[in-house]
Amino acid sequence: MKQLHQLTPYTRAIIAFLFITITFMVMGIFFNEQAQTLKEKNDTLQAEKKQLAAINAQLEMEKSYINTQKMSNNNKEVSFKKWTQLDKVAERMVTESEGNFNKSWALYLVREAEKYQIDPYLVYELLKVETGGTFDPELVGPETKYGRAYGMAQFMKNTAPWIAEMGGLPYDDELLFDPYYSMQLSLIYLDYLHHKYGNWNEALTAYHRGVGGLETYISNNGHAKSWYAEEIQANAKTHESYAVVN
């Protein structure tokens, strides 16, 4: 202290100025760090809020779909006339596939598609594209960053379980190789997507790319008319018109 008093007023003023400056710098760094921490926390909370909102919207859509299915009458008896029509459609699928899509699969698909009021040829053409025309129920797709796709309808293991749950079906990885189970999942998912979007371009593109992939595709192209959606719909129209016999 004695040495400090011996300093000139000018020197003491400089020291005081430096002290105050350093103090403010330290305080500034501290408050900047606090502000950055608060910003990061706020960003995290906003991201979590957005994610929860998306999850809630997804759950609401699934709930709406399930309620719609409960209200629909899917247990109508099939008359002999209708079975005749269904058999003709099934036989056409077998013939067109050169026997790769066997008759029992075709009959099952046509009958189940009728319940969902979906054109069976649309689903048939989807299965043809997914398997490259082989209709191989044991097909394992190539490795992607999201994993592999399995079975005739090419479902991934991160997608199939919640679709099965939504449709009231059991789930096991091995079931993806069951052609009837695979077709049933595809019908549930297609019906859900069509219920969600209201058109087949978006529904089919979402089936192929995922919901996030659909949004990216629309953002990049301004529409949902992907080659996948257009090819399936165009090929489905080449078949004889499907009329449900009441």
Image: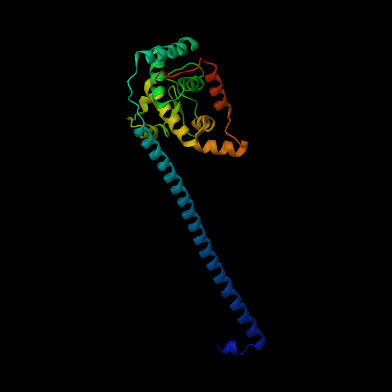
Q: Position of residue 85 (x, y in %)?
A: 42, 13
Residue 110 sits in which quadrant? top left
Relative to 45, is 4 on the left or the right? right
Q: Position of residue 140 (x, y in %)?
A: 45, 23
The C terminus lies in quadrant: top left
In this rendering, is residue 92 above or below 194? above
Q: Can the viewer see residue 100?
A: no
The N terminus lies in quadrant: bottom right
Residue 3 sits in which quadrant? bottom right
The residue at the far right in this view is: 10
Q: Can the viewer see residue 116?
A: yes
Looking at the picture, tell me which residue is in the foreground, 111 or 18: 111
Q: Residue at 34% across / 16% down in the picture?
A: 79
Q: How many marks?
A: 0
Looking at the picture, tell me which residue is in the foreground, 90 or 161: 90
Looking at the picture, tell me which residue is in the foreground, 85 or 57: 85
Q: Residue at 58% across / 26% down in the picture?
A: 227
Q: Position of residue 218 (x, y in %)?
A: 58, 37
Residue 23 sits in which quadrant? bottom right
Q: Position of residue 124 (x, y in %)?
A: 47, 19
Q: Residue at 38% across / 22% down in the picture?
A: 112
